[in-house]
Image: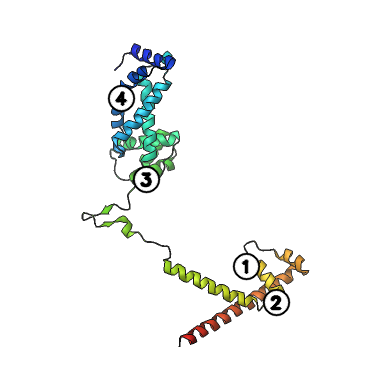
Amino acid sequence: MLTREREFELARRWRDEEDEKALHELVSAYVRLVVSMASKFNNYGLPLGDLVQEGNIGLMQAAFRFEPEREIRFSTYASWWIKSAMQDYILRNWSIVRSGTSASQKSLFFNLRWLRAKIQNSEEGNLSSDTLKTISQKLSIGLKEVENMSNRLASRDQSLSAPIGEEGDDSLEDFLQDTKPSPEEMAIRICDGEIRGKWLRTALEELSDREQMIIRERRLTDDKMTLEALGEQLGITKERVRQIEHKAFEKLKVSVVRISREAITIQQQSRH
């Protein structure tokens, strides 16, 4: 470890003269501090080497920002930057679902386990309502946020390819149900849609021009016209438009049913 005087001397040489040797000596002296702090975050399941690497980045940031005139030891100043760099890395990589990055969420993420163990004397199982309330009060964070974070920490990410059981022959993805239609079903739907569309077009031709216009504008478009607008365009009242629409739609349904039955009958006869 460097003395206070040596720290300040190296920091001034780096800041004022951009002396890289001084920077190297200052940073190298506290690599052990990075390793020591990284070991405290080892229970989050992330590689120690990655934590050390992120901590070294924080150490470099501290060296670039350190002001010896404040009379603060470099190790004290650098500890904050090292810890912050490691915590940011953990929040980014602990789960594929991003955790909250606000100060309160960050505090909750890193203090929840410690508080749970202290209050409940256990890190396993669901937290009781009283424990949740106590943690919420101690951290000044909403009860719902504490509950959500507790649930997230209790369920880690799992690979769908991870083997299940001792044999390891099956994986999680083998038991996932695909709810999407199969290619065969999709082809049938497309084919059926085209056939129904053909029946509808044939049935529409049996309506008068005015009936066809009203049905198209009122039933066969997303941006349908109002009864009043159609009435003005056709020179009739909106009530008359409503009556024509109702009768035309009933005629259309009857025609579609008839045409579909005729098509099915023809298809069956062709097979025989």
The residue drawn where x is 43% and y is 41% is 145
Query: Is the residue under label 4 in contact with that under label 3 (CB below 8 Å)?
Result: no
The residue that mark 1 highlights is: 220
N-term mark: 3 or 1 = 3
Labels 3 and 2 touching (C-beta < 8 A): no
Please tell me the numbered disc located at residue 263.
none
Instruction: Name the N-terminal-most of marks 3 and 2.
Output: 3
Residue 160 at x, y percent in the picture: 33, 53
Residue 170: image location, x then y, percent: 27, 57
Amino acid identity at mark 3: Asn
Asked whether 156 or 263 is in front, the reply is 263
Would residue 139 appear left or right of 121 to someone viewing this image? right
Residue under numbered circle 2: 208
Q: In this rendering, does residue 71 appear at all? A: no
Dot in front, 3 or 2: 2
- Distance between mark 1 and mark 4 Cα atoms: 72 Å
Give left or right: position of 215 versus 42. right
Residue type (three-letter) at the residue carrying disc 1: Leu
* Mark 4: amino acid: Val
Left or right? Give the position of 203 relative to 242.
left
- Badge 2 or badge 4: first in the primary sequence: 4
Q: Residues within 10 Å of mark 2 (few under 14, many from 20)?
A: few
Q: Residues within 10 Å of mark 4 (few under 14, many from 20)?
A: some
- Reading the chain from its start, which is encountered first: label 3 or label 4? 4
Q: Is residue 68 above or below residue 266?
A: above
Q: Which residue is mark 4?
A: 31
User: How many other residues sit within 10 Å of disc 3, few (<14), some (14-19) or many (≥20)?
Assistant: few
Helix, strand or loop under label 4: helix
